[in-house]
Image (tube, rainbow, N blue to C red):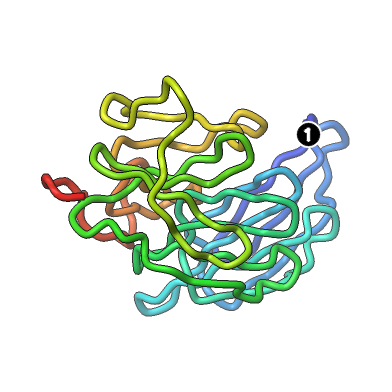
Amino acid sequence: MKHEGTIIASEKKKLFKYNTNEQKIEWETVFKNKIVGISRIENFVFVLTTSWGSYSTSMINYQTGAIKWKKDIVLYNVHILNDLIIFIDTTREVVSISAETGNENFRVKTGFRWTSPKMVLVDQKIYLFSKKKTMLLNLNTGSLVESKLPSKLNPKEITLVIDEFQMNINTLNTSDSGYSPVFDGGIVGGDSGSFDAGADVGGDGGGGGGE
């Protein structure tokens, strides 16, 4: 979905939607804490705020600027399917929440002990994989079972992926570590290193020769 003639920007604790054609602010939302990251995926606007080293993510209504929900999490590798937001958080767990309410549906450990898996959407299925192992995520229960990527996709050779979800949006920053923060701004994802200097929120680079 294109949104020509519109930008979303922040100033310290304020977020606003600006109409570039009419040169006017359509809405603005003030937060209690400093804004350190913003991102839009279709009609979903994510805002990351920080206070005393802790971080929170808020979902904003793109049309009105109203805050739909707020959670004390940071989102990596976000995928949105209908009302589900699937992501990996800073605990390296796969989490499913409701896009509408923010309520958590499930949370499950990835099962990869020594490396950060890549999470991709292929044929409407979520796979997590490394060079040594591939897991398929059940979107209803959160269970992970060993699987294989579709034919001719070799996990031992793939380094970067723009998957089906990312092909339909403005592609987010990608890294070969497997984790990419959803936000644009002064936050540095420890596994990604994709953004400018700011707070370090991720874990390590997740290398190693494990699973």
- Tell me where residue 84 sits by quadrant: bottom right
Residue picked out by circle 1: 1
Q: Nearer the viewer, residue 77 or 40?
A: 77
Residue with the most extreme right position: 22
How far across and down, in percent of the image, does residue 35 sit? 53, 63
How far across and down, in percent of the image, does residue 123 sit? 61, 35
**Residue 65, above or below 2:** below
Identified by mark 1, the residue type is Met
Which residue occupies 29% across, 44% down? 133
Left or right placement of residue 208 versus residue 131 in this view: left
How far across and down, in percent of the image, does residue 170 sit? 61, 32
Which residue occupies 41% across, 36% down? 174
Which residue occupies 41% across, 38% down? 148
Left or right placement of residue 100 versus residue 144 in this view: right
**Residue 51, above or below 60:** below
How far across and down, in percent of the image, does residue 121 sit? 55, 40
**Residue 85, above or below 2:** below
Which residue occupies 73% across, 73% down? 101
